Image (tube, rainbow, N blue to C red):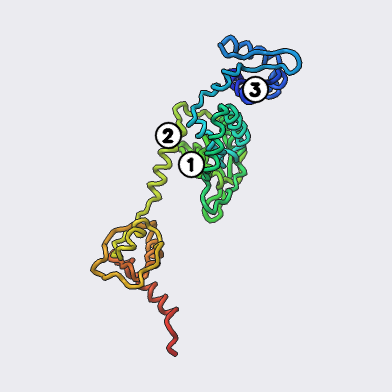
Amino acid sequence: MRADRLLSMLMLLQTHGRCTARQLASQLEVSERTIYRDVTALSTAGIPVYTEGGPGGGITLLEDYRTDLTGLRPEEAQALSLLSIPEPLARLGVGDALKTALLKLSAAVPAAARGQQERLRQRIHLDARGWFHQEEPTPCLECLQQAIWQDRPVRMVIRGEFGAQIEQLVDPYGLVAKASRWYLVFASEGRLRALPVMRILTAEMSAGCFERPADFDLQAFWSAWSAAYEQAGRAHFAARVAAAPELVHSLTLGQPPHLPLPAAPTPRAAWQELTITFDSFETARTQLLGYGGAVEVLAPFALRCSLADFARQSLAVYAPDEG
């Protein structure tokens, strides 16, 4: 803790130029006597910090030392200016502290580099949120965070399928933020699991503490779990189709066509055959219907028949009334 405090003191002196012992004590939440002891420790370590008495006096650094306190190179100072507070950290309650730290570092950048910082900030902006993003309710996030820090079991109620509510007693190991969504990593009945925090309706710390495995690695677990999750969620229904060449790209990506279907159909002899995958039979039928007559399903036969049936139903609805 003292090393952190000494570094914070250096940052404050770099930012403000000169501070009184009272100001530093207030900022660092220690006594003035501790501040003077820290000044002595810094001076002994070779840091050119000194005190001046009288009106306008205080604790300061030599000017030559201040210009290179952070050791930031110009390109590092530019990178610093692009940092912002990720939404998950803000929701975890550390956004203000991180913002203050970034401001201190920014103020500590040599004056010659500050103009470059502002120049870059006005030319590059990073927005990590997805389109149509809505903040997910996570009322239990603070309780989970405290339980994780204290190695306390948590009794929680989870929202299951079809509105069911499931109560569980778990050992919370960690929190992971993935694309602005928080996940709880926990142990239950001898198994490690991960669950979106938004599905936790209530959470309450239980008495006692659990023993966290000494060899547990949160990052390693998450890498393995997320890889398995992605593998399980990959498309597993394959269809063999023939398609107009201009639609092959969007078909390969599994997306609806971004270009209008050609007014004059491409000769059938120029069509290309390819195998594409979908999440399910129903997804394949829905997406392929959107291509109209520019795509023909060759296999499986069941999908081909289903598309024909849906096409006949649509034709029956939109056919001109001959009566």
> Pointer 1 and pointer 3: residues touching (CB < 8 Å)?
no
Query: Under tag 1, what secondary structure?
Result: strand
- Numbered disc in front, either 2 or 1: 2
> Looking at the rendering, in which quadrant would you find the N terminus?
top right
In this view, the residue in front, 270 or 31, is 270
Query: Under tag 2, what secondary structure?
Result: helix
Q: CA distance from mark 1 to mark 3?
A: 48 Å
State the mark number for residue 220: 2
Which is more N-terminal, label 1 or label 2?
1
Q: Picture coordinates of residue 24 (x, y %)?
A: 68, 21
Identify the image quadrant of residue 275.
bottom left
Tag 1: amino acid: Ala
Q: Residue at x 40, y 50 (%)?
A: 233
> Horizontal placement of 146 versus 57: left or right?
left
In this view, the residue in front, 11 or 321, is 11
> Horizontal placement of 297 versus 174: left or right?
left
Seen in the picture, residue 232 relative to 75 is either above or below; the reply is below
Q: CA distance from mark 2 to mark 3?
A: 44 Å
Query: Under tag 3, what secondary structure?
Result: loop
Q: CA distance from mark 2 to mark 1?
A: 13 Å
Tag 2: amino acid: Ala
> Horizontal placement of 61 versus 300: left or right?
right
In this view, the residue in front, 9 or 112, is 112
Identify the image quadrant of residue 15.
top right
> Looking at the rendering, in which quadrant would you find the C terminus?
bottom left
Q: Residue at x 62, y 17 (%)?
A: 61
Please name the residue that numbered disc 1 is placed on: 194
- Numbered disc in front, either 1 or 3: 3
Please name the residue that numbered disc 3 is placed on: 17
